[in-house]
């Protein structure tokens, strides 16, 4: 869904003009990225997306502030993923709060950045989102990992194949990559991932990956979440 020249299209959503200006200035220096629009709140972002869709310039990634008036970033993210499921959302906020991290990821965000992230981390999160990978600020990952408490009996319910799939999810593999690794169709890999989430009582691939690391099923260095 990138431009014909390979550039990643990005929509900036933040209620602070100076933040949007700073991000826009940085992304303008990235030859493989292009800002296609800006919005100061979630509702305006949805209106922008509708306009961009009609013009054939729908973004690949939305950088979404979580704390905004009119419609906050969590609600806006949920609506973006409902209406435009192929558009990835990276949540951006000034603080780490486990409830906010969880809410953003459950709403469909692919990544979670702090506003003090350096330019390279922002670019890396955008690239990861386009590649179907997850990117979490280390502090956010730590906060979320500490909150995950799946019962041990749930672990025992996983089949050997599901454990294998879980390690691939923790390594940041997409459903297509998992299917290729297993020699099965992408939809089969998707079914495995859904079953794993249901058995563990988790809401997202990111939570599953962090949980796998926390439980020692995969080494922490194999984690691709920031």
Image (cartoon, rainbow, N blue to C red):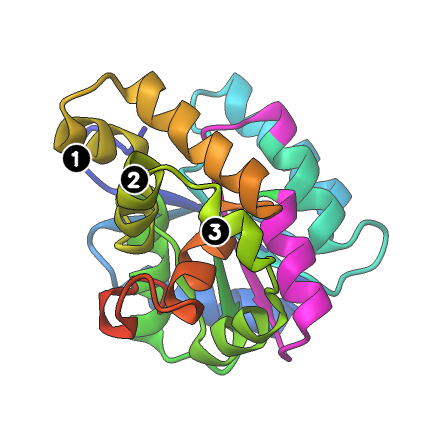
Q: Earlier in the sequence, mark 3 or mark 2?
A: 3
Q: Earlier in the sequence, mark 3 or mark 1?
A: 1
The question of residue 46 being in magenta is answered with no
In the depicted view, which residue is nearer to us: 135 or 22? 135
Residue denoted by label 1: 5
Q: Quadrant of residue 138?
A: bottom left
Camera-side mark, 3 or 1 = 3
Residue for point 30% across, 64% down = 223
Label 3 SS:
helix
- Which quadrant of the rendered structure holds the C terminus? bottom left
Q: Are marks 1 and 2 in contact (CB under 8 Å)?
A: no
Callout 2 secondary element: helix
Q: In front: mark 1 or mark 2?
A: 2
| Other-residue count near label 3 (Cα within 10 Å), few / some / many at <14 / 14–19 / ≥20 | some
Q: Which mark is residue 216?
A: none
* Mark pair 1, 2: CA separation: 43 Å
Q: Tell which circle, 1 or 2, labels the residue nearer the N-terminal end.
A: 1
User: Is 116 or 135 nearer to us in this picture?
Assistant: 135
For the point 63% across and 70% down, the residue is: 147
Q: Which residues are magenta?
A: 82-107
Count the marks.
3
Between 136 and 46, the one lying in front of the other is 136
* Numbered disc 1: secondary structure: loop
Q: Which mark is residue 160?
A: 2
Is residue 34 placed above or below 123 in the rendered structure?
A: above
| Residue corresponding to mark 3 | 155
Query: At 49% from the left edge and 69% from the top edge, which residue is drawn?
Result: 113
Measured Cα–Cα span from mark 3 to mark 2: 11 Å
């Amino acid at each position: 869904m990138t431009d014909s020249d390979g550039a990643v299209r990005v929509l900036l959503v933040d209620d602070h003009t100076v933040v949007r200006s700073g991000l826009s200035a940085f992304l303008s220096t990235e030859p493989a990225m292009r800002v296609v629009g800006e919005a100061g709140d979630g509702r305006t972002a949805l209106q922008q997306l509708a306009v961009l869709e009609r013009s054939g310039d729908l973004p690949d990634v939305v950088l979404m502030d979580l704390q905004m008036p009119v419609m906050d970033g969590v609600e806006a993210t949920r609506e973006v993923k409902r209406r435009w499921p192929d558009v990835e959302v990276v949540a951006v906020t000034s603080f780490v709060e486990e409830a906010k991290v969880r809410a953003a990821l459950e709403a469909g965000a692919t990544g979670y950045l702090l506003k003090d992230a350096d330019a390279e981390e922002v670019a890396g999160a955008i690239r990861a989102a386009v590649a179907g990978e997850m990117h979490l600020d280390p502090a956010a990952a730590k906060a979320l990992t500490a909150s995950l408490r799946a019962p041990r009996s749930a672990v025992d319910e996983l089949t050997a194949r599901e454990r294998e799939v879980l390690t691939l999810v923790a390594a940041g593999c997409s459903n297509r990559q998992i299917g290729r690794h297993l020699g099965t169709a992408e939809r089969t890999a998707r079914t495995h991932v859904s079953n794993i989430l249901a058995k563990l009582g988790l809401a997202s691939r990111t939570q599953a990956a962090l949980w796998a690391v926390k439980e020692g099923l995969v080494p922490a260095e194999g984690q691709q979440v920031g």
